[in-house]
Amino acid sequence: MSRRRLIVGLLFAAAVATLLWATYPCLLRAAARWLDVGKPPRRADYVMLLLGDERTRPFVAAALVNAGWARRVLVAESAPTPKTIDQILPPHHEIARKILFSRGVPPEKIVVLHVAAATTHDEAKALAAFLEDRADARVLVVTSDYHSRRSRWAFTRALAGRTEGVSFVSAPTDYFDVDRWWQDQWGMMTIGSEYLKLAFYVLRYGYLAHWLAACGGLALVAVWIRRREARLF
Amino acid sequence: MLKWKWRVVVAAVVVAVACLFHAPLFRGLASPLIVDQTTDDFDVICLLGDVKGPDGDRCYDVAGDLFPKNPADKILIVAPPPDRVVEAGALPSFETISRRELAARGVPRESITILRSRRLDDWASAEALDGWLRDHPESSVLLLCGQFHSARVRAVLDDALDPARAARVRVRSLPDRRFDQTNWWRSRCGVRELGKSWLVRIQGWLGGSADPPPSKNANDYQREIMQAWQEATP
């Protein structure tokens, strides 16, 4: 009985391994694409430019304002880091502001939200506070393509029911080949860590009800597998 | 039923042991990422950098302290190619930042040599350093880099350089002021850094290095985005 079970298990494992080996480039490509939930822009009052990845995001925000999709850019003030404390580098919001300015966005159109944002969650809370007395404002959140799913998740929670005026525009990543991200140092660091951060966000900021539902679902699956095994062997 | 009870007991024991000995376990998790070959036997200091600035917290302070002890009076800066952010004037280049910071620490301008890497990764930095080592067969280099990045740098140097030249480069790892190997799990930035460093280490083991697509200037990048929006908007 147990020998038959072992052989079936080994065959199953071999089949899964073969399938994974044959399809891993497609799976990894799909994993990168899955992170991107950005949509084409629509008319809005503000562009919320998320901090980080200055090689892409501020250029997209500037293009949106210059093309008339939005009137003003919101940037959260970034929390200090060792490099900014030592004045080796300017803070992220300052870099973003300079890029926007260099790409033709006048300074009066750039609004700095005074929070010490260290995470996407902090930025989401900053936007929620900004929108408290601007209920009808429409906002385009600009972030990197790989970061848009986690951002949408964080903003949906922070804005709690006021998300109809908020949409997400992706800034395409072009400093590594997204179709071969696992072969590139930056690709691995970016896409791989995004999955880790996504898992952390679900754990840290997720709703208890969702967790209970997920655990209940897993328990049901475990019971079903055990019963099935008992019937088979 | 008895089998299940045993499984629960074993799981509980494993969890208890993990909780009790979490510190050595976490230190052990960081160990494969760290190489420290601190030595006095060098005549050139080398600094690495990327779009996020220099690699290694307080690397300029350490380089400034080591410089008077350095008989050849030379600091190598491996500079990545300029990107859109530098071209937009929003950020000084790594070369400019390094010159400014080293000058503030008493390093004369003529002691700094800039090596240009052809792209932004450890392999390209190793290639640039390899070229310099070939032209200076008598020199030995102390390379400064971030603590959790040091094993990766060492591995890339060993892989990309001729063994004799690789042996002339020593890696000194610089811990971050906010965390190190003994306490990284206590801060969010420590966990983030460890996760990223492990990913890059795994990428080195599995994938090696792929050439990135050719870089676009800001105008081309924005033009392509606008075109994509026009095509996607009904």
Image: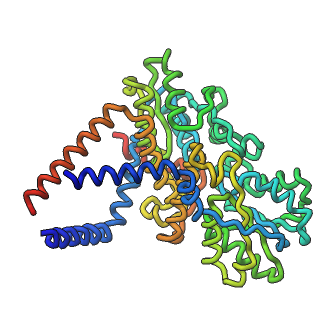
Rendered position, A96 above or below B32: above
Q: Position of residue B184 (x, y in %)?
A: 60, 49
Name the side, left or right, on which B195 lies relative to B8.
Answer: right
Q: State whether residue A48 is above or below residue A19.
A: above
The quarter in which the N terminus of chain A is drawn is: bottom left
Question: Which residue is at 23% across, 71% downward?
Answer: A10
Q: How far across and down, in percent of the image, does residue B160 sit?
A: 62, 77
Res B95 → quadrant: bottom right
Q: Residue furthest top?
A: A133
Q: How many numbered marks does the figure carry?
A: 0
Give the answer, above or below, for where A189 lies relative to A117: below
Image location (x, y in percent) of residue B92: 74, 50
Q: The C terminus of chain A lies in which quarter of the figure?
A: bottom left
Q: Quadrant of residue A14?
A: bottom left
Residue B226 visible? The answer is no
The answer to whether residue B1 is left or right of residue B169 is: left
Residue farthest along the left direction in this orientation: A231
At 19% from the left and 44% from the top, the residue drawn is: A220
Point 37% across, 24% down: residue: A161
Could one spot residue B214 in this view of the protein? Answer: yes
Q: Is residue A204 above or below residue B199?
A: above
Residue visible at 47% across and 70% down in the picture: B206
- Report the side of A14 relative to A4 (left or right): right
Q: Looking at this view, is A182 or B109 the one in front?
A: A182
Q: Is residue B49 left or right of residue B69?
A: left
Q: How is the image coloured?
A: rainbow
Which of A116 and B68 lies nearest the eye of the viewer? B68
Residue farthest front in this picture: B2
Which of the pair A175/A51 is nearer the observer?
A51
**Closer to us: A209 or A115:** A209
